[in-house]
Image (spheres, grey):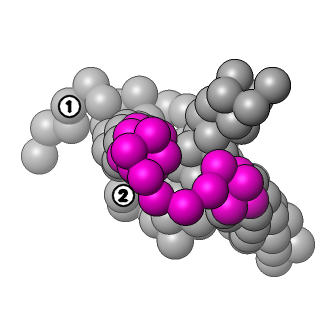
């Protein structure tokens, strides 16, 4: 079976991480812990700014839709970039953590622009 260039690039980038994570249980725990921290920060950032922006109306519905659109694109791009053969559980955490952080950053910028 021949690998495409996306898989080759992905394996080139993430194979050293896989080797490091499998070297010791502590390394795996560091990677898992950092994934949960990233996910938690993203969720707090996103839901915090969603709450600050306010209840649904014509203006905030547009903001919420763009925020969901950003999450969708980050998840799609992460599915393309992250390998699926190994450590998919860890990359699942990173994928959604990055998606929520990207959405939270958009909401923070939009909140500052609209309410400052």
Disc 2: which residue: 84
Q: Nearer the viewer, residue 105 or 55?
A: 55
Could you tell me which secondary element the residue under label 2 belongs to? loop
Instruction: Indicate the position of residue 5 as horizontal and vertical percent values.
Output: 27, 25
Q: Nearer the viewer, mark 2 or mark 1?
A: 2
Disc 1: which residue: 4
- Per the picture, the main secondary structure of the magenta-coloured stretch is helix
Q: Nearer the viewer, residue 26 or 59?
A: 59
- Residue found at x 74% / y 32%: 115
How many residues crowd around disc 1 within 10 Å: few (fewer than 14), some, or many (20 or more)?
A: few
- Residue found at x 69% / y 36%: 111
Q: Nearer the viewer, residue 112 or 76?
A: 112
Q: Is residue 52 above or below residue 104?
A: below
Residue range corresponding to the magenta coloring: 48-68
The residues tagged by marks 2 and 1 sit, at their Cα atoms, a distance apart of 13 Å
Q: Is residue 71 visible?
A: no
- Residue found at x 56% / y 44%: 103
Q: Is residue 10 magenta?
A: no
Instruction: Give the quadrant of the C terminus.
Output: top right
How many residues crowd around disc 2 within 10 Å: few (fewer than 14), some, or many (20 or more)?
A: some
């Amino acid at each position: 079976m021949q690998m495409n260039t996306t898989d080759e690039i992905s394996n080139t980038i993430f194979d050293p991480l896989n080797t490091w994570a499998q070297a010791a249980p502590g390394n795996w725990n560091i990677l898992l812990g950092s994934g949960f921290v990233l996910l938690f920060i993203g969720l707090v950032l996103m839901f915090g700014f969603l709450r600050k922006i306010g209840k649904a109306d014509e203006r905030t519905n547009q903001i919420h839709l763009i925020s969901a659109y950003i999450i969708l694109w980050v998840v799609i791009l992460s599915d393309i970039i992250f390998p699926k053969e190994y450590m998919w559980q860890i990359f699942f955490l990173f994928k959604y953590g990055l998606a929520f952080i990207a959405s939270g950053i958009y909401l923070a910028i939009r909140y500052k622009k609209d309410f400052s």
